[in-house]
Image (cartoon, grey):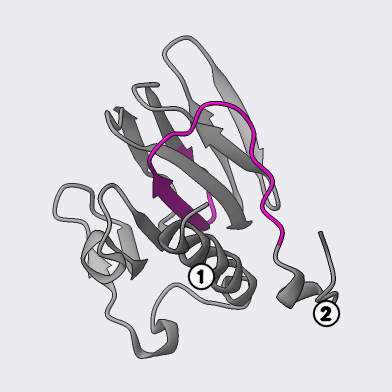
Amino acid sequence: MNKIQKTILLLSILIFASCAAIKPVGLAGLPVHQSSKLPGVQFVPLLTEDTAKAKDIYVGRLYLAPNITVPLHTHSSSQEKIILIEGAATLLGPDQETPFNEGDSIRIPPNQPHGIKTGIKAVILFQQYDPAIDGMRIYRFPELSGDHHAR
C-alpha cells in the first residue's frame, strides 16, 4: 500500500469515528452543500480528489431528508462504501429492495446500479468512493492500536 492509500484509509477511519455524533448541518465548520438535483439531500465533503491529490477519491457525510428517493445510478470508475450512521432506509437495486438500518454497511462495486429511499425519518450516511481493488486487503495500523511492534 502506498503512502497516499494509507493516508486515505487512516483519514477515513478517523472521519468515520467522528461522524457518529454529527447532526445534519454544521459539521465542524465545514460547508454544507445542497444537491442541485435532489431537494432534501445535503452533503459535507471531507476528502475530495482535490484535497487528496488523487483520482476517484471521496469521503463525506450525506444527509437525506425524510421521504426522498435517490434514483438508481452507477459509478463507472469507483466503488462506493456506505455506513448508515443514523436512521433507516431502503437500498434500491434493479430487481430488489433491501432494508438498510443504523450500523449497516455496504460495498457497491463499480457499474452496479443502486439507489436509496428514506422513510418517515431523516438518514445520515458516511460514504467513501475509491478505485476498486480486486480481492480483499487487510491493512494494519499499529500506531492506532498502541502495538508498535505488530508485524
Q: Position of residue 27 (x, y in %)?
A: 42, 82
Q: Is residue 6 left or right of residue 49?
A: right
Q: Which residues are magenta?
A: 117-140
Depth order, front residue of 121/149: 149
Q: Is residue 79 left or right of residue 34?
A: right
Q: Residue furthest left?
A: 36
Depth order, front residue of 56/19: 56
Q: Nearer the viewer, mark 1 or mark 2?
A: 2
Q: Position of residue 37 (x, y in %)?
A: 16, 47
Q: Is residue 96 magenta?
A: no
Q: Is residue 139 magenta?
A: yes
Residue hosting label 2: 146
Kind of residue at disc 2: Gly
User: To which quarter of the image does residue 48 belong?
Assistant: bottom left
Label 2 crowd (10 A; few <14 / some 14-19 / many >=20): few
Residue hosting label 1: 11
Q: Position of residue 46 (x, y in %)?
A: 38, 71
- Numbered label attached to residue 127: none
* Residue 122 visible in rendering: no
Depth order, front residue of 55/12: 55
* Residue at horizontal 80 percent and vertical 76 percent from the top: 148
The residues tagged by marks 1 and 2 sit, at their Cα atoms, a distance apart of 17 Å
Kind of residue at disc 1: Leu
Q: Residue furthest top?
A: 95
Residue 62 versus residue 145 in the image, above or below: above
User: To which quarter of the image does residue 28 belong?
Assistant: bottom left
